Amino acid sequence: MPPREEILDAAACLFVNQGFAGTSTREIAEAVGIRQASLYHHFQNKDEILEELLLLSVRPSLDIFEKIEVECPGEVPEATLYLLALIDVDTLARVPHNIGKLYAMPDVMMNVVYGQFQPARRELADAYGRLGAKVVSERVAATVSIKQLGGILIEQAETVIRSRADGDKVGRAEADAIAAACLRVCGVPQDRIDQAAAIASDLMSALIEERCTQ
């Protein structure tokens, strides 16, 4: 593992387990097995480490969003939302030491970096909202705005954070259940959910294979 990644991994573990404010750069450096001065060759300060960790939890989903919008068939818009949810759940299930838990930590939320991270999370929520608006039923559309719908859908994906904290398994079956739940929130009927799941499953397999070859 490259030194920068080692630092992020060690910091993630310490931040999640003892809090951001309760962790020093010296402790992070010691956990990696390097001098504190060496850590500053990679990160200017602890805030910069926190910012990168927070972005790790949303950036992969944002980076691939435009790609899946193009690749998913337009005649089944439900598949695009389903696939975004699969990717987002996969991202949150893979991030080191369940760093999504940082979202709710008071010492993180009060940090200026958290405010800088929020636009990226809002961008992802907006993506959920735009995709949800394409498939939402009239009944659901009458009760929530697109912005509210995006917030509800991203929170569905983020249930992974709580599941990991509870020690529950988060595999493909759980990801499919969450993706299907996103469509049900939109009022999508089961037959369309099943169709979307089949399409998204094939595309997800291709994306995973592509990721492994990079």
Image: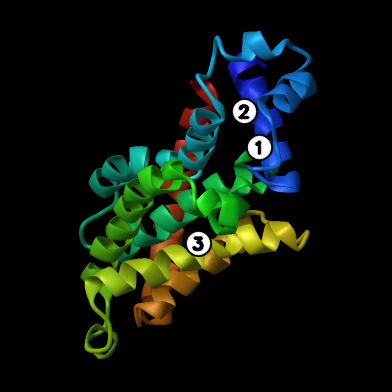
In-image side of 54 versus 183 (left or right): right
* Mark 3 to mark 2 CA distance (whole Å): 23 Å
Q: Amino acid at mark 2?
A: Leu
* Mark 3 to mark 1 CA distance (whole Å): 20 Å
- Residue depicted at x 47% and y 36%: 51
Does 180 appear above or below 108?
below
Q: Which mark is residue 89?
A: none
Q: Say if mark 3 contacts mark 2, CB within 8 Å.
A: no
Whole-percent x and y of residue 125?
34, 59
Whole-percent x and y of residue 14?
73, 38
In-image side of 57 versus 1 (left or right): left
> Given this view, does label 3 or label 2 mark the residue nearer the observer?
2
Judging depth in this view, the residue of 89 and 73 nearest the camera is 89
Q: Which residue corresponds to mark 1?
A: 12
Q: Which residue corresponds to mark 3?
A: 157
Q: Quadrant of residue 23?
A: top right
- Residue depicted at x 54% and y 30%: 49
For disc 2, the neighbor class at 10 Å (few under 14, some 14 to 19, many from 20) is some
Whole-percent x and y of residue 195?
39, 67
Circle 2 SS class: helix
Q: Amino acid at mark 3?
A: Ala
Q: Amino acid at mark 1?
A: Ala
Q: Earlier in the sequence, mark 3 or mark 2?
A: 2
* Mark 1 to mark 2 CA distance (whole Å): 6 Å
Judging depth in this view, the residue of 208 and 127 nearest the camera is 127
Asked whether the viewer can see residue 193, the reply is yes
For disc 1, the neighbor class at 10 Å (few under 14, some 14 to 19, many from 20) is many
- Residue depicted at x 34% and y 78%: 186
Circle 1 SS class: helix
Q: Which residue corresponds to mark 2?
A: 8
